[in-house]
Amino acid sequence: MKLIYIFITYLVLMSTVACAGEVDVIEVKVRRIAGDTYNFDVTVRHTDEGWKHYANKWDVTAPDGTVLGTRILAHPHVDEQPFTRSLTGVKIPEDIDEVTLRAHDLVHGYGGKTATVAIPR
Protein backbone atom coordinates (compact mmCIF):
# COMPACT_ATOMS: atom_id res chain seq x y z
CA MET A 1 0.00 0.00 0.00
CA LYS A 2 2.86 2.37 0.85
CA LEU A 3 4.35 1.84 -2.62
CA ILE A 4 1.06 2.77 -4.28
CA TYR A 5 0.88 5.98 -2.21
CA ILE A 6 4.44 6.91 -3.21
CA PHE A 7 3.71 6.22 -6.88
CA ILE A 8 0.51 8.31 -6.85
CA THR A 9 2.35 11.16 -5.10
CA TYR A 10 5.06 11.00 -7.76
CA LEU A 11 2.49 11.14 -10.58
CA VAL A 12 0.76 14.14 -9.02
CA LEU A 13 4.03 16.01 -8.60
CA MET A 14 5.13 15.25 -12.14
CA SER A 15 1.80 16.35 -13.60
CA THR A 16 2.08 19.66 -11.73
CA VAL A 17 5.47 20.37 -13.34
CA ALA A 18 4.17 19.32 -16.75
CA CYS A 19 1.08 21.54 -16.57
CA ALA A 20 2.89 24.72 -17.49
CA GLY A 21 4.59 23.14 -20.48
CA GLU A 22 7.04 24.92 -22.70
CA VAL A 23 6.81 28.55 -23.71
CA ASP A 24 5.56 29.39 -27.22
CA VAL A 25 6.32 32.42 -29.37
CA ILE A 26 2.95 33.26 -30.93
CA GLU A 27 3.46 36.63 -32.63
CA VAL A 28 6.36 38.84 -33.73
CA LYS A 29 6.45 42.38 -35.05
CA VAL A 30 9.77 43.74 -36.28
CA ARG A 31 10.47 47.36 -37.23
CA ARG A 32 13.56 48.88 -38.77
CA ILE A 33 14.65 51.91 -36.77
CA ALA A 34 17.72 53.03 -38.71
CA GLY A 35 20.45 51.31 -40.70
CA ASP A 36 20.94 47.83 -39.27
CA THR A 37 19.00 48.49 -36.03
CA TYR A 38 15.59 46.93 -35.33
CA ASN A 39 12.95 46.80 -32.62
CA PHE A 40 11.00 43.63 -31.84
CA ASP A 41 7.59 43.19 -30.20
CA VAL A 42 7.20 39.52 -29.26
CA THR A 43 4.12 37.82 -27.83
CA VAL A 44 4.66 34.63 -25.85
CA ARG A 45 2.33 32.19 -24.15
CA HIS A 46 3.23 30.11 -21.11
CA THR A 47 1.24 28.94 -18.14
CA ASP A 48 3.47 30.64 -15.60
CA GLU A 49 3.06 29.06 -12.18
CA GLY A 50 5.11 31.48 -10.09
CA TRP A 51 8.76 32.18 -9.36
CA LYS A 52 9.93 28.57 -9.85
CA HIS A 53 8.35 28.07 -13.28
CA TYR A 54 7.86 31.00 -15.62
CA ALA A 55 8.93 32.25 -19.05
CA ASN A 56 12.10 34.16 -18.23
CA LYS A 57 13.44 35.31 -21.59
CA TRP A 58 13.25 35.26 -25.38
CA ASP A 59 15.99 35.55 -27.99
CA VAL A 60 16.44 36.87 -31.51
CA THR A 61 18.69 34.38 -33.32
CA ALA A 62 20.45 34.39 -36.67
CA PRO A 63 20.04 31.42 -39.04
CA ASP A 64 23.31 29.94 -37.72
CA GLY A 65 22.02 30.09 -34.13
CA THR A 66 23.97 33.18 -33.07
CA VAL A 67 22.00 35.14 -30.47
CA LEU A 68 21.57 38.72 -31.73
CA GLY A 69 19.50 39.96 -28.81
CA THR A 70 17.82 38.75 -25.62
CA ARG A 71 14.83 40.15 -23.74
CA ILE A 72 14.98 39.17 -20.08
CA LEU A 73 11.59 38.67 -18.42
CA ALA A 74 12.25 39.49 -14.78
CA HIS A 75 9.10 38.10 -13.17
CA PRO A 76 6.23 35.63 -13.71
CA HIS A 77 3.18 36.68 -15.72
CA VAL A 78 0.69 34.36 -14.02
CA ASP A 79 -2.38 36.53 -14.70
CA GLU A 80 -1.24 38.02 -18.03
CA GLN A 81 -1.30 35.42 -20.80
CA PRO A 82 -0.34 35.72 -23.53
CA PHE A 83 1.83 38.79 -23.05
CA THR A 84 3.93 41.02 -25.31
CA ARG A 85 7.28 42.58 -24.51
CA SER A 86 9.65 44.65 -26.63
CA LEU A 87 13.36 44.66 -27.30
CA THR A 88 14.91 47.72 -28.91
CA GLY A 89 18.18 48.36 -30.68
CA VAL A 90 18.89 44.88 -32.05
CA LYS A 91 21.67 44.99 -34.66
CA ILE A 92 20.97 42.69 -37.63
CA PRO A 93 23.86 42.31 -40.10
CA GLU A 94 23.06 43.17 -43.74
CA ASP A 95 23.61 39.56 -44.89
CA ILE A 96 20.82 38.20 -42.66
CA ASP A 97 17.39 38.14 -44.30
CA GLU A 98 15.43 36.42 -41.51
CA VAL A 99 15.71 35.70 -37.80
CA THR A 100 14.11 33.20 -35.46
CA LEU A 101 12.55 34.07 -32.13
CA ARG A 102 12.73 31.43 -29.42
CA ALA A 103 11.60 31.57 -25.81
CA HIS A 104 12.87 30.00 -22.59
CA ASP A 105 11.34 29.00 -19.27
CA LEU A 106 12.97 28.05 -15.97
CA VAL A 107 11.91 24.38 -16.02
CA HIS A 108 12.04 23.30 -19.67
CA GLY A 109 14.66 25.68 -21.03
CA TYR A 110 14.23 26.40 -24.73
CA GLY A 111 11.36 24.63 -26.42
CA GLY A 112 7.87 25.20 -27.60
CA LYS A 113 6.97 27.05 -30.77
CA THR A 114 9.44 29.39 -32.41
CA ALA A 115 8.74 32.04 -35.05
CA THR A 116 10.87 32.96 -38.05
CA VAL A 117 10.38 36.41 -39.54
CA ALA A 118 11.79 38.29 -42.50
CA ILE A 119 13.90 41.36 -41.81
CA PRO A 120 12.42 44.44 -43.48
CA ARG A 121 15.10 46.27 -45.49
Image: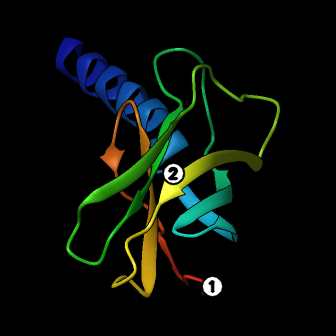
| Residue 109 pos. (x, y %) | 32, 42
Q: Amino acid at mark 1?
A: Pro
Disc marking residue 120: 1
Q: Earlier in the sequence, mark 1 or mark 2?
A: 2
Instruction: Name the residue rendered at 63%, 85% in the picture.
Output: 120
Image quadrant occupied by the N terminus: top left
Residue 28 position by quadrant: bottom right
For the residues labelled 1 and 2, the Cα–Cα distance comes to 26 Å
Looking at the picture, tell me which residue is in the foreground, 69 or 49.
69
Q: Residue furthest right?
A: 79
Looking at the picture, tell me which residue is in the foreground, 87 or 89.
89
Q: How many residues crowd mark 1 within 10 Å: few (<14), some (14–19), many (20+)?
A: few
Residue 121 position by quadrant: bottom right
| Residue 97 pos. (x, y %) | 43, 88
52 shown above or below 22:
above
Instruction: Name the residue rendered at 48%, 31% in the picture.
Output: 16
| Residue 84 pos. (x, y %) | 75, 49
Element class at badge 2: loop
Cβ atoms at labels 1 and 2 below 8 Å apart: no
Disc marking residue 101: none
Q: Nearer the viewer, mark 1 or mark 2?
A: 1
| Residue 119 pos. (x, y %) | 55, 82
